[in-house]
Image (spheres, helix red, strand yellow):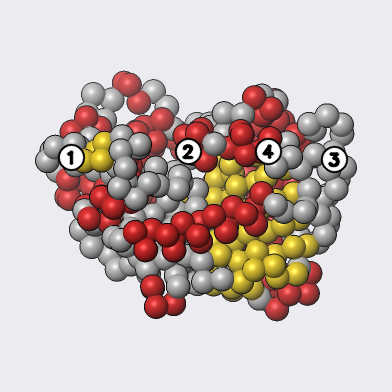
Amino acid sequence: MRKYEIMVRESEYGAYLGAGAGLAAVATPVAITPNFDVFDAPGLRLLLGKCSRLADDEEPEAGRFGIDFHRALPSFDGQGEGVCDWGAGPIAVNASNYAKYLPCTLKFREFTATLAFAARTYEEFRIKSQVYENFYRHLYHAPAPLIVAAPHAGDVQRPADSWHPYPKTEIDAWTARVASHLLGRPYTGEKRLLISLHSTDYLGSLLDIGDFGLPQNNSLTAVVENLNQRYRPALMELLPAYREHIMPYTTARLKYFVNRWGTLEPERLKRRSSAVRFEILNLTRIMNHSQELTDLYTLPGMLQGLERFWQKPPPLITLNGIFSGRKTARLLKLAEKLQQYGIYTAVQLEVSRFLASRHPQLAADLIKTLLNELKPETQQPEI
């Protein structure tokens, strides 16, 4: 049995279910909860999310809630996060309205990309807030020089419906196994670093690095260029298998979007599903010369445009190509928190699920090289 299979227990969809026997041999459990687990190993603290990130996917009797730890702690019924209007008039973005209008609110990034959870009552709000704050207490107070958090690694048990036809895609699948490959060789850098580890099923780069908009990450442009030069031969070898893996899935999603919403036009999707609009715009960004396609936002046009990605693939390691993390950094007041708790910098990593599931060691090697090349003030030692 390979190392990552005994280090962590995962569902068939790649969700983290708990520690395996191998993890207990190299890491000390700090907190084992229904919503997240925390482990300490030499030079590293590891936080693995166990709960669903979808607001209506919960097991209250087990103390397991729908919490997205990479979003802001909401107000219960305030006005501070703006409004959302899907054609019924402006609705304040807060935990109470998030819950009141579920599952409709799952279509709108004003809620899903902004708020950590929904809450029907103030008591529910209080309990979820405590879970959320405990997660960040373990993160910011970590004694280790390297903190690796996979906040969306937990299972999604919500059944599919017309509001959310592919709920399992909300799992940051196989991130726990990638994280397990970072254990064993202690990180001893002089500056504390935070890695926020995610996975994605968007067609495009195999590793996207988000800079969180932090000025101390200005060196990432050169770092990403170096990573592409070093790893491009290995990644290019994976392209045939990656294409076989990702294209049927992407095609099926596009067909569903056309049937469900009647359009792939970004402007028309604004009030129908801003989440789908975001996905369509992400796909068009990776197409070569997509502006030449007059019928781009039709199913044939999108598929023709996606073929251009494979004709001349762009760099497979990107900077801010999928999620920069900049909005999240604002929501979490990340710059202030890093300074407050003595953490030099943070980066967001989006690993392709294909890479994470089939080549977790390669994904971890990419991350280790990234850590060594950040070099905040002095040369980072090998890990």
Type of the residue with mark 3: Glu
Residue furthest top as drawn? 292
Q: Earlier in the sequence, mark 1 or mark 4?
A: 1
Crowding at dot 3, Cα within 10 Å, few <14 / some 14-19 / many 20+, comes out as some
Type of the residue with mark 1: Trp
**Quarter of the N terminus within the rendering:** bottom right
- Mark carried by residue 86: 1
* Residue pictured at 45% horizontal, 48% vertical: 73
Q: Nearer the viewer, residue 282 or 275?
A: 275
Type of the residue with mark 4: Gln
* Residue pictured at 17% horizontal, 45% vertical: 261
Nearer the observer: mark 1 or 4; the answer is 4
Crowding at dot 2, Cα within 10 Å, few <14 / some 14-19 / many 20+, comes out as some
Q: In this figure, what is the number of numbered marks?
A: 4
Secondary structure beneath label 1: loop
Q: Earlier in the sequence, mark 1 or mark 2?
A: 1
Kindly identify which residue carries mark 4.
340
Kindly identify which residue carries mark 2.
331
Q: CA distance from mark 1 to mark 2?
A: 23 Å
Residue furthest left as drawn? 88
- Mark carried by residue 190: 3
Secondary structure beneath label 4: helix
Q: Nearer the viewer, residue 100 or 283?
A: 100
Nearer the observer: mark 1 or 2; the answer is 2
Crowding at dot 4, Cα within 10 Å, few <14 / some 14-19 / many 20+, comes out as few
Q: Earlier in the sequence, mark 3 or mark 1?
A: 1
Q: CA distance from mark 3 to mark 1?
A: 49 Å
Secondary structure beneath label 3: loop
> Is residue 238 something that shows in the picture?
no
Q: Position of residue 62 (x, y in %)?
A: 44, 77
The quarter of the picture where residue 190 lies is top right
